[in-house]
Amino acid sequence: MTREGNIAKLAQLKSEVEGIVKTYNDAIQNGRFEESTKADGAMAEKINEYTATVRDMCFEDCKATDDPMLTAVKTLSYVTIGVKDEKMGDDKVPVRTVVDKERAIDLLKLDKYCGGIGHDKEWMHVAQKMNFLLTCQKARDLGLDPQKVNDSYAMSEIARQFEMGKNPTSKTNMLRTLQMVVTAMLGDGYKATSHDVNFLLSVYSRKNRKALVVSCANHRSFRGYIAEVCHRIVTGKEYELEYKTKREG
């Protein structure tokens, strides 16, 4: 389908979703729950079709350039649609509306779509190895046996065999390790900084719902974090910090 055809398809799908949302709202507010469930399913199907279409258009745009990886990390995301429920009125009745939503470009899916992207075609395995090493380091930081991580960690055999040097996750070597991943993705001339290391270390693990448990990034999430690092490098943007601020006045 041509780009013009896809644009027309997106407009049609959005219009159909908006119509289904009206049906859903009327059904949910009047207690016709079987009808609302059916509308919810139809809505999800149309939204998924919209997302797949706009994603493929984004991928095609990247593929048409001389460097799809560079284009992807500059773009970083594409816009699809979704729905949002808000409680309105005195009775706080939930009302659903159609909203725009950003979706991060999945670099691995783009790699498969294009038949290979990046300076080094094995870039995803290089990223996997760094993620593994960071997980082992987190185990050490928490007083756990990293050998258990080593024996059970899921990654490709290419990643497992890839060497990143001695003590790759030490404070002195972390930047060099990150640079290996960035170079594999973008090539020479794109330099990571200590700020990029700090950003990565800030986001790659989080508190689990269970007490005393830390969750480390899966490979998809880690690729997303690395993509953001590359985005900062190629665009020259700065990191931002969100925190609770005091009220003025």
Image (tube, rainbow, N blue to C red):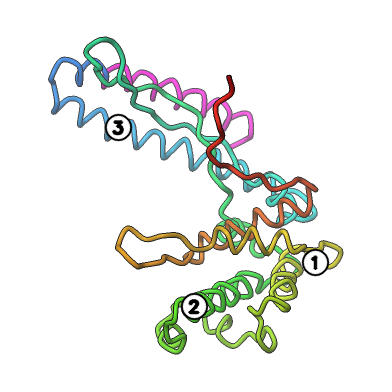
Q: Residue type at mark 1?
A: Gly
Give the residue number, with chain letter if any, for mark 3.
42
Tag 3 or tag 1, which sits nearer the N-term?
Answer: 3
**Viewer-proximal residue among 157 and 89:** 89
Q: Residue type at mark 2?
A: Met
Residues packed near mark 3 inside 10 Å, few (<14), some (14 to 19) or many (20 plus): some
Which mark is on residue 187? 1
When asked about the image quadrant of residue 214, the answer is bottom left
The N terminus - image quarter? top right
Stretch in magenta: 1-24
- Closest to the camera, between mark 2 and mark 3, is 2
Give the residue number, with chain letter if any, for mark 2.
155
For label 3, the SS is helix
Q: CA distance from mark 2 to mark 1?
A: 23 Å
The answer to whether residue 33 is above or below residue 140 is above
- In screen coordinates, is 206 left or right of 243? left
- Closest to the camera, between mark 1 and mark 3, is 1
**Viewer-proximal residue among 18 and 247:** 247
- In screen coordinates, is 63 left or right of 93? right
Could you tell me which residue is drawn at 27 percent across and 18 percent down? 25
Residues packed near mark 2 inside 10 Å, few (<14), some (14 to 19) or many (20 plus): some
- In screen coordinates, is 34 left or right of 5? left
Percent position of residue 39, x then y: 25, 27
Could you tell me which residue is drawn at 77 percent across and 62 percent down? 193
